[in-house]
Image (spheres, grey):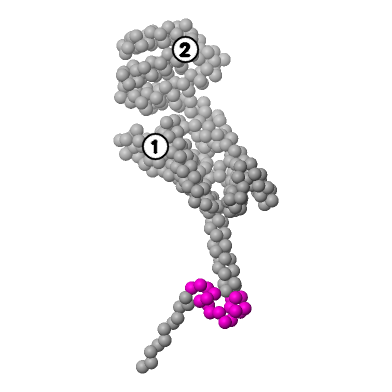
Amino acid sequence: MRFSLNLTIVSVAIVIFSGCLLSTASAQNPQAFVQVNQLIKQGKKDAALKAFSDIVSKYQRSDPETAAEALYQEGLYTQSPAYAGNEKELEDGQDKAVAAWQQISNNYPNTKAASKILSPINDFQRSPLGILEAKIDKRNSTGVMYQIINSLVKLTGSHPNYSYWIAIILLAILVKVLLIPLTRKQYVAMREMQRMQPLIKELQKKYKGQELSQKQMELYKEHGVNPFASCLPSLLQFPFLILIYRGIIAYQYAFVNGKFLWVGSPISFKYPHYIATSLAQPDIPLLVIYTLTNYLTMRLMPAQDPAQQSQTNMMALMTSGMFFYMFLIYRWSSAFVLYWLALNAISIWQQYIYVFRPQRLSRLNQLAADGAASQEIITTTIVDNPSKSVTELNGKPARVRPRKKKR
């Protein structure tokens, strides 16, 4: 009912919108917008969006003003009744509009189109982009994950300087606590596979090809080890992680109020392309720290032989570089990067507890056992062969204490 009333009120704006689009376009580059205006009049939505995209691709280097204007007009179009015929299309249009206008803010900050979407237009210092983001944030506020994150922010006082980043870390801790059973099974399975490596290496010396695979499976069965046990818990975690990701994305416009150390500090406004002005913006230093912790997390996976350790190190380097590239290209918010950084920090601690420390203790116990066994062999041999010296048994010259000279 309300949506129908809104459509009735603004239906007259369709003609006005088309006229404004034509006049504005002609002021920028009249030839570039002829086709897109015809498509809008004909009601061809998908074709019109593709035409806007073609204008941006064509003029992004040679004429940034025209490219930015195309993005601005695309945002106006997807919010207009000419595009939105129902509630679903209205939400889809708002999402497309905010994506287009954020692209102007990120890639064309010095254009006339950027001043249109970033300049305040009311007493609350709200810009057109800010008003649009507030609408989407209000729409997202009904989601369950949004409510969970918002509750954590309120729990810490809703203070811009610390509440938002503490809420992110609390969320990461909550996720890790819920996943403890799966994580523990994964690390136990990894530890069992590492324990089997010396036996696998012996099989590799004796067998090749299909026979080696058969002998390995027999060895796993004999020792009660499932080689795929460490993979299953990881796969079961993905749906849960996707849910958290969607929650942070839904809350991203509220993260505009959040700060974290250098994020949102005065220096961030001097270098906004590198340092985020809020937790809703991408941040390069935080991304670098995340990449280093991701590399360290994978490097903490111990291997039994140098060849396997070399492969693990190379995989850690490649995977960390890939994640850095993805986060950089998709410009994910610093709030999302901080969440993954917190997950990595907890994972490093868990790997130390469940994998690194037990293996280290096992090696120390094995060395102690080998030393005790060697000492027992030497002692037994001395008893059986009293005529032989310790030097002959041990293979090493015995240290002789020098005699003191008499005065």
Question: Where the C terminus falls, by quadrant?
Answer: bottom left
Residue position marked by numbered label 2 in the rendering = 47
Residue 178 image position (x, y, % from top left) = 59, 44
Quick check: can you spot residue 303? yes
Q: For the residue marked with disc 2, what is the amino acid? A: Ala
Horizontal arrangement in the rendering, residue 269 relative to residue 17 (left or right): left
Q: Secondary structure at mark 2?
A: helix
Task: Give how far apart the Cα atoms at labels 2 and 1 are.
Answer: 35 Å
Horizontal arrangement in the rendering, residue 97 relative to residue 88 (left or right): left
User: In the displayed structure, would residue 24 be above or below residue 300?
Assistant: above
Residue 363 image position (x, y, % from top left) = 55, 60
Q: Is residue 394 magenta?
A: yes
Q: Secondary structure at mark 1?
A: loop
Question: Where the N terminus falls, by quadrant?
Answer: top right
User: In the displayed structure, would residue 36 be above or below residue 372?
Assistant: above
Rate crowding at label 2 as few (under 14), some (14 to 19) or many (20 or more) other CA atoms within 10 Å.
some
Horizontal arrangement in the rendering, residue 56 relative to residue 194 (left or right): left
User: Residue at position x 40%, y 23% from top?
Assistant: 101
Magenta region, residue range = 379-396
Q: Quadrant of residue 277?
A: top left
Residue 10 image position (x, y, % from top left) = 47, 11
User: Residue at position x 53%, y 32% from top?
Assistant: 246
Residue 270 image position (x, y, % from top left) = 30, 35
Q: Pick the residue in front: 208 or 151.
A: 208
Q: Is residue 398 magenta?
A: no
Residue position marked by numbered label 1 in the rendering = 283
Horizontal arrangement in the rendering, residue 208 relative to residue 402 (left or right): right
Which mark is first along the chain, 1 or 2?
2
